[in-house]
Image (tube, grey):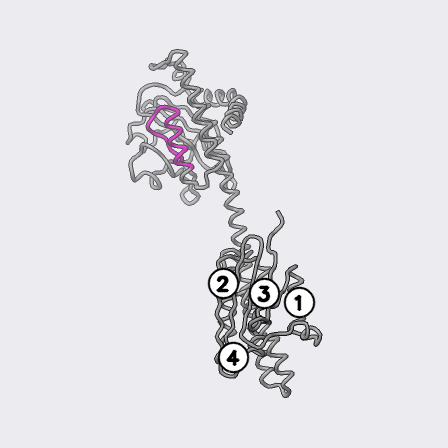
Amino acid sequence: MTAEITELVAEVKADIVSETVIQIDTVTSPTVEAAPRPEARAPAEELTYRLRQQSILARFGERGLRERDLQALLDAACEACAEGLETAYSKVLAFDDQTSRLKLVAGVGWRDDAEGRASLGADMESPAGFAFQTGQPVLSNHLENEERFRTPGFLAEHGIRRAINVLIQPEIGGRPYGVLEVDSPDEGQFDAKDAVFLDGFASVLGAAIARQAVEKRLLDAVEHQAMMAREMSHRVKNSLGLVSSLLNMQSRSATSEETREALAEAGSRIQAISRVHDQLWRSVDLDSVPLEDFLCQLCEDLTHSVPGTTIDCQVGPGTVPSDVAIPVGLIVNELVTNAMKYACSVDRCVIRVSGTTDAATLTVRVEDEGPGFDIEAARSNKSLGLRVVDSLVKQLNGTLTVDVSAGTAITLTASIARPD
């Protein structure tokens, strides 16, 4: 990865070297450019210095690809730029829409209260403003004698003598993000190659900022969709609860026992679906439902429907996909309701519901202490409840087994593995 980034940076630098130097010449006085560097390096030292800059830029490029925190990215950029140009001062100036000024949002070397408070003019009269307005790197080696621009008081307070300003390219809301600046209070000179390094650095930083902006928009869109889905599940839950209540009211006013039972069972089934949607809108993950929360809440609600009923719910941790939870909830609702109807004595009713799940398989078991349940006879009689259960088991590609050795134990086994 480092080699690829280094190669990319080298290509970018090769494309911008000539343009950058021309831009610098247009804003740097000839007398300043002609002045010798007091700390001129030997050729070997110069090569080491430039290679070190490339290494720093490559390392930052790797971080820019993975960093998701904007402030951490800006802080790292300031530290790396200061290291690469062997100075104690660097900063990122972001354009502030409210003040139309360049606001210091990250930096190294400045006083503690500078970040978030200090700002510079974004007009053509300051070095940073000129770079921001024109996109041209600005190289200033003698700020105390500068005649082209006013020297910002903030720099004078820190004794800054020389600076390089380059534009951070990505456009946010139709204008560039801001300016990357490196400063030094020491005598000497930044040269055109230093400006090329900083300009290349600003390009990498700009690309990283743009990536973060795109990711933020995508995350915001996903969160908005999740919020809408939760709101929809909440509304569906409320609507189903209303329908269930209406069916129960109609059941109580029905004239025949058969009609009352049919309406009550329909209301119970609708209420079971409502409980799944209740879990969905509360869940962090809209694609799945905690099995324990869902089934045990279902059992608790069913307990209140028959006085003297005890439902012991023992479900292990784990989740099931939301499209699996609805049929599972309906199956458990039918099996528990059936046990209440046929396995409970007048004054005592104990039903046990258990469940386990892993990445591939779901197992749910409903047990009672009744006289036993003849599932084949119920199928022969075309029991509506059993037909509903069989249909839902088929939908899940699952199996249903019955053990009547001690009461009745019905076990649902279904695959919940998702294809890759």
Residue 163 found in image quarter: top left
Provide residue 373's location: percent of width, then percent of height: 61, 74
Q: Which residues are magenta?
A: 73-92
Give the residue type that dot 1 points to: Asp
Whether label 4 touches label 1, CB < 8 Å? no
Provide residue 257's location: percent of width, then percent of height: 63, 85
Q: Tell me how far mark 2 sits from mark 1, CA to CA.
A: 23 Å
Dot 4 or dot 2: first in sequence order is 4
Residue 306, numbered label: 4
Provide residue 391's location: percent of width, then percent of height: 67, 66
| Residue with the mark numbered 1 | 390
Q: Nearer the viewer, mark 4 or mark 2?
A: 2
Task: Using the image as rendered, state which of residue 24 and residue 277 is in the foreground.
Answer: 277
Residue 411, numbered label: 3
Residue 272 on the magenta segment: no
Residue 176, placed above or below residue 261: above
SS at mark 1 in the image:
helix
Q: Nearer the viewer, mark 3 or mark 4?
A: 3
